[in-house]
Amino acid sequence: MTERRQVNIAKSARTTVFYIFVIGIAAIILLPVYFIISLSFLSTREAYTYPLPLVPALNTHFELRHGERGYLLSVYDRVEGGYESVLDTKDSKKMSEYMRYQLATPVTTEDLEQQFAKLESQDVVRFSRRRNLLENYQSFFRVSGYKAVPALIRSLQICALTIAISLSVGGMAGYAFARYTFRGKNLLKFSTLFVRMFPGVAIAIPMIKILVGLQFYDRPIGLSLVYSIGNIALTVWITASIFMGIPESLEEAAQVFGATKARAFLRITLPLALPGLAAAAMYSFLGAWNETVSAIILTQFNPTFSVIVYQTVLGAVGQVNLAAAGGMAMALPTVIFTFFIRRYIQQMWGGITI
Amino acid sequence: MAVTARRNGKAWRKIGRNAVPYLLVLPVALYYALFWLRPVVASIVASFSDAAGRFTLENFALVFREEDFVPALRNTAIIAGFSVTLEFFVALFLALLINRKFRGSGFFLFLSMIPMALPAAAVGAMWITGLTAHGWMNSLLGYLGILAEGKKLYWLVGSDTKLLATLIVIDAWQVIPSVMIILLAGLQNIPDEVQEAGYVFGGDYLHVLRKITLPLLKPTIQTAVILRMISAIQIWLIIVVLLGFSRLPVLVERVVYYTKEVDRLYIADQMAAGYTLVVAVIVSLAALVYLRASGAFKREGEQFT
């Protein structure tokens, strides 16, 4: 009895230590992600304080006094633990704008006028207002709005086209690889390596000429043709691996019962492969959605969403929180897809090795 | 008439059956010929051409004489060598951990895959805001009490060695998941019984790992390492995002620099073309040497199912 209890304690102690260890690793991996997410919710003022707040504030605490030029606005600083003066004006519109853009706290001018009125009878007025946590996301789309939304649509078009091209072209070859022996099979396998050996940037330059010739330059189809180069190579491997995981005997059985090879494929193999192929499509999506470098070179007036975000990041000298919001908006679909992809890793990568 | 048609049909069908795999591969071949081989050939031709389009070797002389060439070569070699090694070991460790299939390992797998899914722009923003003197890295270290109050670490200034180390770690953070998933797939392919047999015969964990798991995983390891090596030699974007051009030159950064940044220099295109071929040759040689040395070519006959 005691012995068993001891074993149980030892076991649960080991389990606990193991989980602390695992959580520790997860924390290290996710720490940078946490900070970029947190940053994307900070107000511009908060984003430039040091040390950076660990969590975004839900409310902003204001203090109003009589100032030299009108009313002196102070904001509570959580890090310093006191109020800091930020603006001295009698213009309620100016103050409201400052509150919105710098402090991400919407306060109407009427509201402000009321607070100003209170100053007639007292020296200090303190009040808190709820922060708009999504301010950065909204203003990312507002600032680059005329570009961001069309760019988003273009990016989705490019992704759809890339998936269609690479899954159909690559999938056929992947099937051939999984089911047949033929000459050049090895070459096909190594093609994934070949196409990666030549720097992608270097291909993009001569590609301009080819795309202009096809009248595909600066259009979604043009970029998806470029993205498909690397994507097809990967899709061949991944789809081959998926088809290898589906027993050929199932197809043969269907043929015994009179189905043609094509029919056996369509009715038996394809439905079984579908979840894996969906994962492969999501994997292609990640590549096409995130690609930035070729997109910069191969677009002129019609940038992709990744280019817009990249420009915000590089150009956002005064607005890191805005850049963070853009980056996170872009990361959202990829993270969701990753959640689904994780189940199909073995199917996707288990079949082929060099 | 009908008879010939039928006979023809039969003959065609036979040819058709043999041709099936080739027909299935044909689109890939055509695609590569049109959209990969053509730009590659154009780029190679450009690297042997002067501004007027005549044959010349001058471009390579220009590249080798450039003062940033040797540093670029050195930095690329250091980054590739260290990051592939570091990434491989960490990825293997994570893959082994996840393959223990503990409760929640699926979710842990998802969490550890997240860095891989993030776009370059987001990762750039993440480290720019993290590594400046007033960034979140220093804030965090301050909160944890590791960094004394008022003290700051300057991550992005200092010696080349320090910058290289920082970059290798940052790059590893994003790249490890893509190495890890390949290794994990390989591990999941090894039947449990094989490893259990090792334990039955008295092996401990490390013993089984060394004598059974890793040898069985060898083809997967080669695949993961070669794919990673090819892209590690071509690293540049994160460097430019964090440090700008020319601060820490690497080979592909030079290609981009001469392609995008310098357009007034009349030899810029030639420099870019020259560098491109140098990179391609170095990557191919490195891949070849690795595949040779790791014995991947020897297996070819028997592997390939």
Image: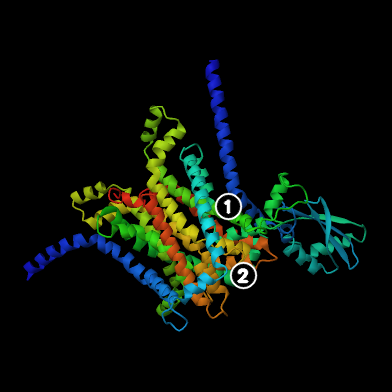
Q: Nearer the viewer, residue B175 or A114?
A: B175
Q: Which residue is labeled 1 in the image?
A: B169
Q: Position of residue A134 (x, y in %)?
A: 65, 59
Q: Quick one: which residue is furthest to the top in this view?
A: A1
The answer for how far apart the CA atoms under marks 2 and 1 are is 33 Å
Up/down of A215 relative to A286, above or below:
below
Q: Position of residue B124 (x, y in %)?
A: 60, 60
Residue lying at 38% horizontally and 40% vertically, measured from the top left: B190
Q: Position of residue B150 (x, y in %)?
A: 78, 51
Report whether residue A199 is seen. Answer: no
Q: Nearer the viewer, residue B60 or A79?
A: B60
Residue lying at 50% horizontally and 49% vertically, measured from the top left: B85
Quarter of the figure with the N terminus of chain B: bottom left
Q: Which residue is labeled 2 in the image?
A: A144
Q: Nearer the viewer, residue B121 or A251?
A: B121
Does residue B100 appear left or right of residue A130 in this picture? left
**Circle 2 — which element?**
loop
